[in-house]
Amino acid sequence: MEIKVTSDTKLLNQLMNGLSKEKKIDIGIFGNSIAGIAHDMEFGKPNSYIPQLHKTVNVPPRSFLQVPIQEELAPNMPKKLDEEKMVRFGMNYVAKTIKDEALNVVKATFLNEGYGDWADNDPEWKEYKREHGYDEKVLGYTDAMQEAIEGKCY
């Protein structure tokens, strides 16, 4: 009696093909005048001048990219990926899903002011914002920085 075992490796080959093509994901602020300000907000900036208050303050680091992506996105990402779609659509699906989820995490970070980790605003700055009708949230002056964040897959 002869036993013959065959296997269809077509899907496996498709997945391997998709995984071998390099994909890159960028999340951040690109080619925008706000990029420098965003860097200072992410990592902090001693002796930052606030023209509206005519004074210098130390801006503490308030991570809206690195820490949230490492602490909120990375641990939960495997649950967000659908294995069937990974096989079917390959790295394009994986890259787009990671980009979309990263942008969601960044938006949530602004909404909840750094998951409670951001240092509060200078009291005079809070008062200025309140008096002039601006959003009183940390990093919520005009929302321009939040709106400038984008994701790219290529």
Image (cartoon, rainbow, N blue to C red):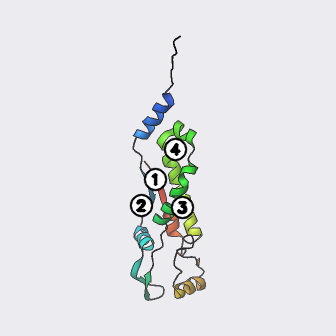
Whether residue 102 is visible, yes or no, is no
Dot 4, crowdedness within 10 Å: few (<14), some or many (≥20)?
Answer: some
Residue 60 sits in which quadrant?
A: bottom left
Which residue lies under the disc numbered 2? 30
The residue sitting at 55% across, 74% down in the picture is: 140
The residue sitting at 42% across, 46% down in the picture is: 23
Which residue lies under the disc numbered 3? 72
Dot 2, crowdedness within 10 Å: few (<14), some or many (≥20)?
Answer: some
Calculate the distance from the C-alpha at mark 4 to the C-alpha at mark 2.
23 Å
* Element on which disc 4 rests: helix
* Left or right of 61 on screen, residue 114: right
Q: Nearer the viewer, mark 3 or mark 1?
A: 3
Calculate the distance from the C-alpha at mark 4 to the C-alpha at mark 1.
13 Å
Calculate the distance from the C-alpha at mark 3 to the C-alpha at mark 2.
22 Å
Calculate the distance from the C-alpha at mark 4 to the C-alpha at mark 3.
20 Å
If you read the primary sequence from the N terminus, does the residue marked by circle 4 or circle 2 appear first? 2
| Residue furthest to the top | 1
Dot 3, crowdedness within 10 Å: few (<14), some or many (≥20)?
Answer: some
Q: Nearer the viewer, mark 3 or mark 2?
A: 3
Q: Position of residue 65 (x, y in %)?
A: 47, 64
* Dot 2 and dot 1 residues touching (CB under 8 Å): yes
* Element on which disc 3 rests: helix
- Going by the numbered disc 2, the residue's amino acid type is Phe
The residue sitting at 48% across, 61% down in the picture is: 70
Q: Position of residue 109 (x, y in %)?
A: 55, 67
If you read the primary sequence from the N terminus, does the residue marked by circle 3 or circle 1 appear first? 3
Question: Which mark identifies residue 152?
Answer: 1
Q: Nearer the viewer, mark 4 or mark 3?
A: 3
Which residue lies under the disc numbered 4? 93
Which of 112 and 141 lies nearest the eye of the viewer? 112
If you read the primary sequence from the N terminus, does the residue marked by circle 3 or circle 2 appear first? 2
Which of 37 and 7 lies nearest the eye of the viewer? 7
